[in-house]
Amino acid sequence: MTWLRSTLFNLCFMAVTVPFSLLVIGCRPFGFSAAWFWARGWSATVLTLLRWIAGVRLEVEGREHLPDAPCVVMAKHQSALETIAMPLLVPPFVWVLKRELFYIPVFGWALWALDEIAIRRSNPREALKQVLAQGRRFLSKGRWVVIFPEGSRMPPGETGDYQASGIMLARQAEVGILPLAHNAGVCWPKRGWIKRPGTVRMRFLPFIPAQQVQETPRPELLARLKTDIEAATRELGG
């Protein structure tokens, strides 16, 4: 039954992604807000299908930690689910993602229309320069920036190498950092066709103000973020 429900969901997921992507692309000339409206609509539709068809529910904790001003979100990365849910979790933002995603027909073009920060991971030095320059520009315009410090998706129970680019961006832009932990990989595994029924819990951890980001030594702050995000992830079952 799980395989059948997962197959039905995956087919519906692909079916709704194309028209919503076209709406994002088609509305972009009318402004970012018009395109973002349909991006949020896609997220809401996919999560509704995921709940009704695959039996995967989403719970969000710690919304009280979201600041009033733009910031850098540093999030655990386990599956595609957290990226799908993100437009419903935080104000309008840009992702830092690999440039290859732009090459996906229709969907990748929609990502391009939303002005995401697309880096070439083969050139880390240039990628960092791009993240810092473009990230500062978007933050100054009121857009949040979402970074996955591990770089790639990690299966539940595993931890990748945390990179400091999010801290460096927050320092240069003089903004705070909002950590995010979750267990999305339990229900939506990396490269997994099967979507396992259950509850995905996403938890925003206490916000780190800009002044604290500036005053805390970078290695110490990175270690703290890694420890806190991983501990919360394990607590959530991820």
Image (cartoon, rainbow, N blue to C red):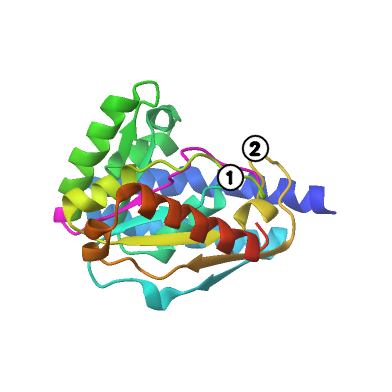
Q: Which residue is mark 2?
A: 191
Label placed on residue 139: none
Labels 2 and 1 touching (C-beta < 8 A): no
Q: x and y percent of residue 120 in the render? A: 35, 26
Query: What secondary structure is marked by label 1?
Result: loop
Direction right: furthest residue:
1
Q: Which residue is farthest top?
A: 122
Alpha-carbon distance for marks 2 and 1? 17 Å
Residue at the (45%, 46%) spot, across then down: 19
Check disc 2: other Cα within 10 Å, few if <14, some if 14-19, many if 20+: few
Residue type, numbered disc 1 = Thr
Residue 31 visible in image: no
Q: Quadrant of the N terminus?
A: bottom right
Q: Is residue 11 magenta?
A: no
Q: Quadrant of residue 48?
A: bottom right
The dot on residue 159 is: 1
Q: Is residue 183 visible?
A: yes
- SS assignment for the magenta stretch, majority: loop
- Residue under the point 64% across and 45% down: 158
Viewer-side residue, 201 vs 103: 201
Quarter of the image with the C terminus is bottom right
| Residues shaded magenta | 140-155
- Assign a secondary structure to mark 2: loop
Name the spot of residue 191 as percent of width and height, x first: 65, 37
Residue located 18% across and 48% down the image: 172
